[in-house]
Structures are given as structure tokens and as C-alpha cells.
Image (tube, rainbow, N blue to C red):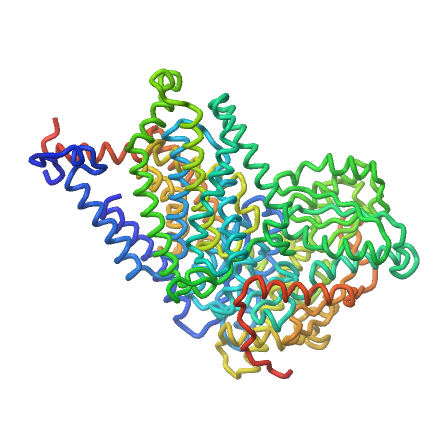
Amino acid sequence: MFYRETGQFKQSYAADQAVFPILQDRLGLAAILVVAFVIVPLFGNEFLLASVMVPFLILSLGAIGLNILVGYTGLLSLGSAAFMGVGAYAAYKLSTIFPGVNILVWILCSGFFAAGIGVLFGLPSLRIKGFYLAVATLAAQFFLQWCFVRISWLYNDNPSGAIEVPARTLFGLAITGPSATPVTRYLVVLVIVVGMTLLASNIVHGRIGRTWMAVRDMDIAAQLMGIRLLPAKLLAFAVSSFYCGVSGALMVFLWLGAAEPSAFDIKLSFLLLFMVIIGGLGSMIGSFFGAALIHILPIVIRGLPEALGLPIAAATVEHLTYLIVGALIIFFLIVEPHGLARLWQIAKQKLRVWPFPY
Amino acid sequence: MSLKNWLYALSAAASLTLPAVHDAQAEDSIYVPLFTYRTGPFAGSGTPIANGMHDYLTLLNERDGGIGGVKLIVEECETGYDTKKGLECYESVKPKKPVLVNPWSTGITLPLIPKAAVDKIPVLSMAYGLSASAKGDTFPWIFNPPATYWDGFTQILQYIATQEGGGIEKLKGKKIGYIYLDASFGREPLPLIEQLSKELGFEAKLYPVAAADMQNQSSQWLSVRRDKPDYMILYGWGALNATAVKEAVKTNYPMEKFISIWWPSEDDAKGAGDGAKGFKTLNWHAVGADFPLLADIQKHVVDAGKSQVSSKDKVGQVLYNRGIYNSMLIAEAIRKAQEITGNKVVTGEDVRRGLEGLNIDEARLKEIGLEGFTGEVKLSCADHNGHFSTFVQSWNGTTYEKVSDYIAPLSDKVGPLLDADAKAYAEKNAPWPARSEACDAS
């Protein structure tokens, strides 16, 4: 009844090709942005901002990066955590070599380093596909993590072997380091994630995105239609790694505050892959859904016994969380193998014809 | 995501965190969170430590009604040895005004080091974390007694020298193998090894084990078999220790020449069977439950069903007692803080002063009920570690027994490294705040 595009006529090609052609969608998006930019920072407590929202947004960005590769281009990758690590280490090196330049510049630039490494490890993708490519990217994961441990230049010879985040400011306001407040960090992350999501959304809806999807659906057909496979696949690797790299730099600088190489281990790669698969392959909003399910849901479950006053030991809660989240993942995959994004789509469709379904 | 979903998520998250804040601050109490890991790949090491820490503080609540008449609120937060979860724990306990935190993971300690001064929450990283944080002038909020990994390495070297029948000059020409977790913890002694091997003239053989390959050390031990080092030194944690002992037995490496830093537990040695007899580790406290305090724990906590230990004989194991030691430091720091400030309910700032003024002498140990359990602990504003002596204990098939005297670290070798490291840390993290906290003359 309320969610219907009846009467919304498009009078230009631009309007017809808009990412959000329906007015209600645009209003909904505006409402989400208002909540994210105004209501959450105003009313959220420190825990919500620092431990729920900031990690959620950063993981979402990483999931978007991986989704570009796996969901849009159909290239399975297990190296996303390593590409995040490249971004983090690049941002760390750049910010220590050129401390005068604003840290946000380096966080965004770190994406280019990750993109470069990503392209290098994407080269085999022309010849190999599917599981074989997954194994090739797994090599990237192991090799890069080995570099993070062994090449002491990368962490400025710290005896702790970890990268530590120096305190940096933006307009006189601390955005990294211990005195940066969760609100500031949240807003910085939010601006970057929203901006990069819009950019990604435009890329995948345009010519480049269509190229990728053609490659995903059938690469020989795409080739016959005149798409050059190598540049298309390498571009997907570059853009995907760029996103992962920025997300990795954000992770160290605005979330963790210091990181050992083990922060970028294969577990993180798998987590991102789960987010993408559960959220929805080839969907921007799916990346956010996936990150929410994998990151926020366990926190909510962990907090429940305390909120309800149930005396359950911390370790038992942890075991229960694993059980419940695992069961929910299976449940969602059975109910809708195409991910949460598909469920969302179905819900919207139902809403469109409500209250007179046909 | 629609607005509705967002609001649901928000209200759910808010309702989770808000009520918890109130009940912790409601009455006169001291909030002590314990970061523990009873799940995950390191649970084998983490569980006894968690039990020890928890049981000691519970005993104080049950037997004495807390410390100085103020109840302790002891709450565990499960980290799973995962840095991200550890930080989540930190954020979730922060609003409840903890008087100190024990991260129990170097990975979690490192991000907390700069935060401690801002949030006014001291960090007690007992013999792990950043070695340089022993320097109280640079790191007023971080404490890592009773010894650093560098201290431990020099203690092992001295023990080896006494086995060879003399001082450290006896190490000349010896071949010493070092098998370690290839992460920050195990790599920390590398600069020291490089320096000492030149100065003392021993040959160091390095066998790194990647964290992912902890349970697969066959290639490292093949190299050990080929190199035939005179002594082997182990810096491991979790499954790495158990696997290393097993592989050493399989390789027929003479166990009495295999010496580890202080982390292996009984189970690590037991898993390798009879062949593990003679395996040695460093330690700074006694093993076994033969102390009045542990008897009290048995009576008031374990028998009362307030402990999570799976069986009674777990009380008194190495890592259980390590947890006891950790909680003893916590409790004594709170007691000292009450003494200094005259307040019953103390804050993180007070406990920081309490830790700096920590002075547990023999008489106090006897009062606690831990006479002969460990050496004296005395910290100062400049020295947050103490660099205390440790001893060597040997596995006899059922338990560890002490086989050496207390060995002091080679402070003249370690000291300059610590100074340089603390200075480098402050420089790399510029602007690093200069110490502004006054020092209580104790």
C-alpha cells in the first residue's frame, strides 16, 4: 500500500537508470543515513559505537570488497584477510614515514598498495577458476602473512612484532590513538564506508559492473561479446583488494589500535567469505546483512543472559553463541540459499503487493 | 536495512549494555573483570589460569567479605585469546569502572597500552605483553611482574651454564637451539639472542614454528636431529608446548637438556608419556596445593561448588597456581591502594599507585597463607617488573619438582635493551605522553 511505485513516472534515461528508482527506497535510504549519522552518535553509548558499530562498518567494507570479486565477478578468493593486511601495513608504513600527511589520506592510499598486490595475485585467474583459484589466493594469504611476520621493515623493527597506531588528528580532533573518542572514530569510519559503498554501487551498476557480471555468468560468452577477460578480471581484483585494503587500514587504525600479524589470519578471510555468502552474493546490502549477522548477532546473544539476569558462566555463553550462530547460519542458508539480501528482496516484493497479494 | 530494523538492533544493543552498568556501580564494591579463555585453541592453558584467578578472588569474598570489608565483583569475560574479542571485553567492562584489567594475551595487551593512561585503568600483564613496559617512567599504567621474557632467557642460559659446571663463560662453543612461536611472543628474545651469542660465544640455532603449524613440528625437529644442539630452549604456548615435548621425545632428544620458559602445564608434559621425564621449565612459584590458602580455597570455594574446576586435583597445578599468583597481585594491589588513599572503595588511579607501592614480603606471604609459595614482590615507580629470580623445575612423570635455586636474571645485559626498547616505543608512538603521575615514596 505504502511501498508502491505507481504514479512515479520516469522522464529521463538518468531517472530510469538510477540506483534507487523508487521514491520510497530513496526515503528509506535517507532515513537510514539520518539514523547512522545523527541518532546513533547522539544516543549510542561507547560500547555500541566502539565494539558494535565501528567493527560492523569495517567488516562490511571488507565484505563489499570480497563481494565485488566473488559475488559480481565469480572469482573465489580466500586471500581477502591478507589484502586487508597489506592495506594496514601500507597505511602504517606511510604514516610513520610521512607523519605530517593526514592519516585519512594514507588510509585511502593504502588501498592502492593492496590493489597492486591484489592484481599480482589475480594474474592466475585468467587460467584457473573456481576451487583452483581459491587455492591460488590461499597462497597469497599464506605468503603475505609470512611477510607480515618475517619482514621486520614492515613493522619498523618493533620487538613486539606488532604495528602500533600513533595518535593522529583531523581538524585538531584526535581520530586515531587512545584519546580518539568512539564517536569520532565511528563518524570517520561511517563517512568512508558510506562514500565507498556509493562508489561501489555506482561501479557495479555501470559498464564495469556489467562486464564483471558477464564474466561471472559465462566467461567464454563474455569474451565472444568483446570483453577482454584479463583486464576485466584484473580490474575486479584491483577494486576488490582496494576495498579490502582500506578496510584493513581502518581496522588497525580506528578499531584495534595495534595489530599482530595474526589479526589477518585465514580465519578473517573465512569470516568475510561467510559474510558474503550468507549476506548474498552480488549484493551491496547483502554485505551489510552478512556483517551484521556474523559480527553483531554474537554480541547480542552474548549479552542476553546478563540482560535477563541469568547466571550463566562466560565460557558457557560463548559455547552457546557458537551453537546458536551456527544453527542460524544453516537455517538462513536452507530458507534462502541466495542469502539475506534475497530474503530482503522477497520481503520488499511482498510489501509492494500488500495488502492484496496475487 | 530499513529504519525499523535499525531501531530494533539499536534498542536491543542498548538494552543489553545499560542495565549492566547500573548493578556494578550500585553499592560499595570493587569491580575486577577477569579476561579469560576457556574456549578456543588455547583453552587448555587458559582454563586453569582462569580457575586460579577466579577462585582466589572468590575466596576473599566468601571468607573475608572482600578486601578491607569491600566486596569484589568478579566477572569473567571470555576472550578466546582473540584480540578482537578481547577489545570487545575491554569496551564492555570499561563503563563499570574496573580497577585494573588482566588481558592474558600479548595481542590484547598491545592495543591497551596506549589506552590505559587515557581511560585510567591499569593493565597487569603478568610476565607477558610488552617487555619494555617494565619501565614505569615511560609506561606508568602498565605492570608486568615478576620477570620479562628477556629475563627468562638469561635465566635459562645461566642454568645451562651451571649444568656445564660454571658461570656463563661456560657457554662458549656450545650449540643452543631455540624453538619458538613465530609471533611477537617468541620473536621477542631474538635481538637478545643475537647479542648474547656474540658476547658469550655460543652458537644459536633458531627453529620458528608458525602459529598455524603449532601441531606440526616435524620439520623443525628433523633439523634439531641434524643440528644436534647441546641444549634446547622452548618459548611456546597452548598446543605448541605439548607438541614440542612430544616431538622431542620422538626425536630422542635428551629431555634434561630441554628447558622451557614458564608456560608449559602438567598436561603438556603428560601427553608425551614417560619419555617426557626430565623436561624442565622455569617457574617463580610453587606447585601443589600444600598451602593454607589453597586449603581454604578447597574448603570455601571448591567444596562449596563455587569453582569451575573439573576435579579437585586440578587445584595446585602449575597454571592454576599461576592464576592464584595473578590474583594475589590484584588483591594486594587493591589492599595497598586502600592503605595509601585511606578509601575503602578504590579506583583505577588508586590501584595504579597500589601496584607501584606493591611490597609483598615474607611476613605478608605468611599472612596470606602462601608462605614459601614464591619470592618477595616489590615494585617501584621506575620498575614495574621487578626482574625477580625464577627457578627451574623438572617433570618427574606426575608433577613438576623444583631442581634449582632461584636464579637472578642478567640485568646488565637485559637492562640496556629494555631502556632502548622503551625509548624506541615512545619515539615511534610520538607524541607519547610524558609521565605525569606523581610517585608515592614507599
Q: Is residue A143 left or right of residue A233?
A: right
User: Splitting the image into 4 quarters, where does residue B109 fall?
Assistant: bottom right
User: Splitting the image into 4 quarters, where does residue A356 fall?
Assistant: top left
Viewer-closest of A51 and B421:
B421
Q: Is residue A174 left or right of residue B139?
A: left
User: Splitting the image into 4 quarters, where does residue B320 fall?
Assistant: bottom right
Task: Work out which quarter of the rendered image holds the C terminus of chain B and state it.
Answer: bottom right
Above/below status of B110 relative to B356: above
| Residue drawn where x is 80% and y is 52% of the image | B394
Viewer-closest of A316 and A85:
A85
Q: Position of residue A120 (x, y in %)?
A: 52, 33
| Residue drawn where x is 44% and y is 25% of the image | A230
Q: Position of residue B245 (x, y in %)?
A: 75, 43
Q: Is residue B176 left or right of residue A269?
A: right
| Residue drawn where x is 73% and y is 35% of the image | B219
Q: Position of residue B116 (x, y in %)?
A: 51, 66
Count up the numbered dots: 0
Task: Work out which quarter of the rendered image holds the N terminus of chain B and state it.
Answer: top left
Viewer-closest of B270 and B230:
B230
Above/below status of B333 relative to A256: below
Residue placed furthest toward the right: B165
